[in-house]
Image (cartoon, helix red, strand yellow):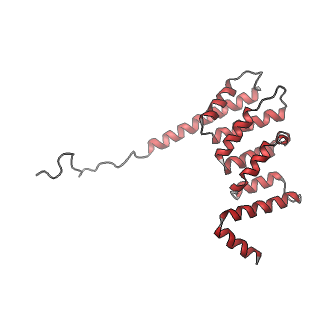
Amino acid sequence: MRRRADAIAASVNPLFAYNEKMAELNKLMEAGAISEINAARAMEKYRISAAGPFLVLRICAPEFFKLDHEEKNQALKSLCTLRPKRGEEVCIQLLSESKLIRSRAFEETRELAAQYLAEVASTNPALYLLEEVAKGSKWAYSHQLRKAAQAALDRLGERANQYISSKNQQPAGPQPSAVDEPKGQRGQP
């Protein structure tokens, strides 16, 4: 009976279905039956876009830098897949952070942010930040981070070229046919 009521509620309000899936994932995580990384994969797989705020909170938490590479990667991937615009904003925020003494985990997180910006960036601030990091000094940015930012810039260039070539292949508008009358000739004998 409960499943039928849930199905009816989901058909009336799609957000209900998302909330139900999120609640179920939260219960599984709290019980230890599913890891956060598997929960993030499920959110991405089932396109639970309502998970965006949860992912943002997780990524922006101070302990995010301490997670292992795979968990950080999956959280950013899920966010950028579900909410590309918000993913771009969060990646800009991560990449903009700086510390006097940088740990490897901190730099690794910033490298991941640069990699995901390569796939979702659509604004000038993202482009300018990647340029700044790629051309920045070794005192401000690690060698690996500068390489990641340069690779992201290269990927953005590829994406721009693909977009331009796809636009050039589309017809510009209706093509005149051979039977069209020249302008000014209409209705004249």
Residue 128, quarter of the rendered image = top right
Q: Give the residue at the far right of this rendering.
A: 32
Residue 155 screen position, x and y as percent: 62, 36
Residue 143 screen position, x and y as percent: 75, 26
Count of numbered labels shown in the rendering? 0
Q: Give the residue at the far bottom of this rendering.
A: 1
Q: Residue at x 70, y 65 (%)?
A: 16
In the rendered image of this protein, does residue 157 appear above or below residue 67? above
Residue 163 screen position, x and y as percent: 52, 41
From the viewer's perspective, tell me whether residue 170 is left or right of residue 62.
left
From the viewer's perspective, tell me whether residue 82 is left or right of residue 178.
right
Residue 94 screen position, x and y as percent: 74, 36
Considering depth in this image, is 160 or 30 the residue closer to the camera? 30
Residue 69, quarter of the rendered image = top right
From the viewer's perspective, tell me whether residue 163 is left or right of residue 18.
left
Q: Residue at x 67, y 23 (%)?
A: 135
In the rendered image of this protein, does residue 117 appear above or below residue 101? below
Considering depth in this image, is 26 or 113 the residue closer to the camera? 26
In the rendered image of this protein, does residue 44 appear above or below residue 128? below
Q: Give the residue at the far left of this rendering.
A: 189
Quarter containing the N terminus:
bottom right
Q: Residue at x 68, y 68 (%)?
A: 10
